[in-house]
Every structure is written in C-alpha cells, then in structure tokens.
Image (cartoon, rainbow, N blue to C red):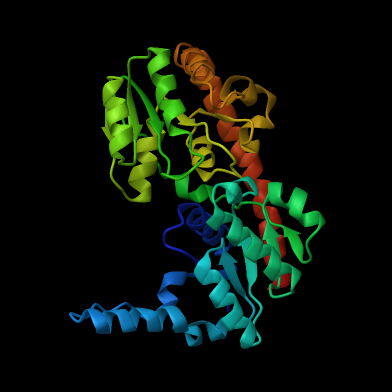
Amino acid sequence: MKKKILLVCSRNSPGPMKVIKNLQGVVNQYIQADCINIEDFLIPRFHFKSKILNYKYLRMQEYLNLLRLDRISEYGDNIFLVAWGALYDVLLKRLNRRGVKPSLIMCSTIGQSDFNDLDRLYMLQVIDNVMKGRVKDFLLNKRLYMSLGKILPRAIYFPHPVDLSQFSSIIPQKLPGINIDIFVSLRPGKNIMNQIFAVKISSIDCVLHINFRNPQIERFIKTLSLQTKVHSWIPDSEYYNLVAGMTLSLQVTFTESFSYAVCERMCLSVPTITSYDIDLISEDRFLSKYLCVEGLDTPTQIAERLKKIVGDDKLREELSIRCRERINKIAQENNRIVKEYFSINI
C-alpha cells in the first residue's frame, strides 16, 4: 500500500498549485499525494435574504472559522501546507491543538513578501510559527534555503519538482508569423508594462499573446497599436500546445523563486527572455548571454534581446535545444532530492 500525504493549498494560488501538480507527478509511483484546497475547510457560505441574519452568519464564520479537521485526521503529521495566507495560520493552530504538526512548503521569496503590508504580515506569521516549533519541517526552495535555512530551525532544502512526463505528448500549435507571449498572473512584480513597451520598441511584426484582462493594460496595448490576442483559461494540455507554438516568450519579472512559467517553456523548447533572478537560465552561460536582462525597468534592453533572437533562426534553434537539455538536467537533480526527502521522512 502506498504511503499517503496531504497537500493543502489555496485554489487562488497558481504558483503553489503548480508545485503540487509537479510534486504529484514526481512521487505518484510510491506515494499517494492527495490535494485539498484550504477554502474547502470552511463550511459553504449561505446568503440569507435578511441582512441581519446574513451579517450574524458571516460573523459566526469569521469567529469560528468552522474547520472540517476530521477530514484530514487519517494523514497524521504527513500534511504539507503549500504557501501561506490568513486561513493557513488558523488551520495550523487548530491542527497543533490536536497534536498534529504539519510541514510547510514555501514557494515564494523574501522579496515577494515585501510588496505590501499583508504579505509582510504573512512572512512574519511563517517565521513566528517556525521559531515556536509549530511546524514539523520547513521546506525551502533554493533561494530561501540559502538565507532562512541558516537561521531557522527545521529548515530543509526542498527544490521545485519538475514532472517532465506532462510534456511528452504535446504537439506545438501551428501559429502563422511571429508569436510572442506574456502569460502571467496579475500581481505586483510581473513587470507587464515594461515588457509590452519592449515589444513596441523592437518594431517586430508579431502577435502578442496575453492571458489576462485588465482595462488599463488593454487600453495601453491599443494605444501602442500592437496586434494582440487575449486568451481565456484553457486546460493544461491545450495551454501547453499553444505555448509550444510560440516563437519566443517574455517572463522578465521581479523576485521569482523558480518560475514554473519559464520551466514549462524550457520543457517545450521555447526560448524565454527573463531576468538574472531565474537560476534556470542565469546559471547557464550560453542561455544567460542571450536570454537574461539586467535592466528590468528598461524596455530597450528587453527589446534588444527580442530583435536579436527573432532575427536569427539558427540562434533561436540553439537556444531551444539548450533550454530543453538544461531543464532535463535540473529536473533529474531536483526530483532526486524530493524523492529522497519523502523516502526518509514519510
């Protein structure tokens, strides 16, 4: 019988959900890795016609949090909270009262916690809970482990897993002309305006693909007279087929810990312009020479990379091959460490 673990994550957190998906794919041969959204611990909200009853009900939920802890008692301490938020703090304390110490997988960086007061509060809660021994293992990505791993107890290096099997049957979508994507979640640090400016400055006759809707950004794109295609949510397999058909991708963002967006494009052999923050690219001399940008707030630098790669078919092919070779090597090493952790600790 397979050993069982439970992964807990918010359905509104795309990055941590990527971690869970890849983790399940990597360990599924010998571990049953179940997943539950932390929002599912709350009893569904009811909406009463009476404003007074509705107000009282919402106050009751806020006060009690109504966590369905009996649903996860079978996992014991083999519960992993992936990322952090307000509900996680409540859940952790309720589990501790039952004698359960879950582990915590951190997906972000210290820099990402500095975007606003709420993110800083969440980082403070994480550190406080770890220091007070409420967490079994504190599993940290490379960048966090190099800093927090030196000062916090129960810190363990836990690199991002990469499930290569999900890309084995992908067929690139045939897209006419030159196609560039900026597929990101709308949050601070994604540097969207600079990347759009770079496409305009490059003067490349292309279609810019985006996966978000924002009135100000759409107006900005229209003002620049860029040919754009906006994509709604599509299943992963279709999404990967689409991305695999791109000429080039843009992920020149701030404060990334790993970037599954870049990882996926490397798996699909799509060169991706990014920052030196992304070790996937920056630690390879050849890739960093052509794909990394120092001036993230300087669209002319991004535009120079765009023009160089789009204008040189041979270079683009070399970058595509090297991207795939490098991510295969990274996946092999990261997955080995992840599997070793579970074989020892579960």
Looking at the image, residue 118 lies above or below residue 40: above
Quarter occupied by the C terminus: bottom right
Is residue 37 at least partly visible in the picture? no
Is residue 182 at least partly visible in the picture? yes
Residue 271 % position (x, y): 50, 28
* Residue located 57% across and 72% down the image: 89
User: Looking at the image, which is closer to me, 71 or 202?
Assistant: 202
User: Looking at the image, which is closer to me, 251 or 223?
Assistant: 223
| Circle count | 0
In screen coordinates, is 10 left or right of 289?
Answer: left
In screen coordinates, is 63 left or right of 279?
Answer: left
* Residue located 81% across and 58% down the image: 151
Q: Name the outermost residue toward the left.
A: 49
Q: Name the outermost residue toward the right.
A: 150
Q: Image quarter for residue 153?
A: bottom right
* Residue located 52% across and 31% down the image: 252
Quarter occupied by the N terminus: bottom right
Q: Image quarter for residue 138?
A: bottom right
Residue 311 % position (x, y): 45, 11
Looking at the image, residue 205 lies above or below residue 54: above
Q: Image quarter for residue 140?
A: bottom right
Residue 260 % position (x, y): 52, 45
User: Looking at the image, which is closer to me, 315 or 289?
Assistant: 289
Looking at the image, residue 115 lies above or below residue 122: above
Residue 324 % position (x, y): 56, 34
In screen coordinates, is 312 left or right of 81?
Answer: left
* Residue located 42% across and 14% down the image: 202
